[in-house]
Amino acid sequence: MVAQIHPTAVIHESAKIADDVSVGAFSVIGPNVSIDSGTQISPHVVIARNTRIGKDNRIFQFASVGEDPQDLKYAGEETWLEIGDRNQIRECCTLHRGTSHDKGLTRIGNDNLLMAYTHVAHDCQFGNDIVLSTQATIAGHVTIDDHAIVGGLVGIHQFCRIGSYTMLGGGSIILKDVPAYIMTGGNPAETFGMNYEGMKRRGYSKETIASLKEAYKVVYRKNLTLEKAIETLEASEPSPELSLFIESIKLSTRGILR
């Protein structure tokens, strides 16, 4: 099958495009770009350089993908952006490559939805099944784990880690790490319990949800030091779901939102 490339698209000679990829009118694909099968590139998309895109993605009009990082220390080093499979990157999103001061790589996993006008800065590391709502702004070196939901107009400070199954309320300003399952909101953000409704939708048992409710109380309501709270939780022979919560706290480098 021949790739469906509009005659007005500009494709660099070093780009590698699978046979069934479609590229819309006036899109530009730069050097060292690879695009795997089933991916659709809408009109007026720019994929600048050094970007690897997996299968069955859809990139909508006016998105800027793989551009130089907005970092004053960046001096033209060869860095990369890697996008997995089945992602939707909506209108006017901006995704930048990594820097040599970190891994040299910005990575987006699989099955993510990046709504219009979202920004993913250099060296971010995204898992799978994440939603970035409209105009969410993610600073450099941020990690977002699987199944997180980031509300519209949220700003996340550089180097923060956002745990799995979190919900960040619209307009929140996130300055510290957010453990798995936590719900937040405000400027600066505060915690508002755990995402229990999301747990129910994903089939968590009543026993599992009850254990996570108790874990939340241990960390957030009993005035324990974080070290003592972790010690208390680990003494309970935690389930895999509770272990995820504990591990997300232990991985924190900026201190958790508490």
Image: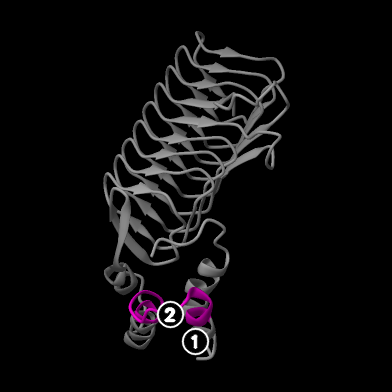
Which residue is drawn at the image coordinates 65% and 26% (left, top)? 73
Q: Are marks 1 and 2 in contact (CB under 8 Å)?
A: yes
Q: Amino acid at mark 2?
A: Leu
Which color scheme is applied? one colour
Which residue is drawn at the image coordinates 38% and 61% (left, top)? 166
* Residue 11, quarter of picture: top right
* Residue 108, quarter of picture: top right
Q: Amino acid at mark 1?
A: Thr
> Does residue 109 belong to the magenta stretch?
no
Cα distance in 3D space between marks 1 and 2 = 10 Å
Q: Which quadrant: the C terminus?
A: bottom left
Q: Nearer the viewer, residue 20 or 159?
A: 159
Name the element at disc 1.
Answer: helix
Q: Is residue 195 above or below residue 79?
A: below
Characterize the local packing of mark 1: few (<14), some (14-19) or many (20 or more) Cα atoms within 10 angstroms: some
Characterize the local packing of mark 2: few (<14), some (14-19) or many (20 or more) Cα atoms within 10 angstroms: few
* Residue 155, quarter of picture: top left
Which residue is drawn at the image coordinates 43% and 51% (left, top)? 130
Q: Position of residue 66 (x, y in %)?
A: 57, 28
Q: Is residue 109 above or below residue 253?
A: above
Q: Which quadrant: the N terminus?
A: top right
Q: Position of residue 60 (x, y in %)?
A: 40, 28
- Residue pushed farthest bottom? 236
Q: Nearer the viewer, residue 145 or 84?
A: 145
Q: Nearer the viewer, residue 113 or 196?
A: 196
Name the element at disc 2.
Answer: loop
Magenta residues, start to end:
216-230
Q: Which residue is mark 2?
A: 224
The main secondary structure of the magenta stretch is helix
Q: Earlier in the sequence, mark 1 or mark 2?
A: 2
- Residue 232 marker: 1
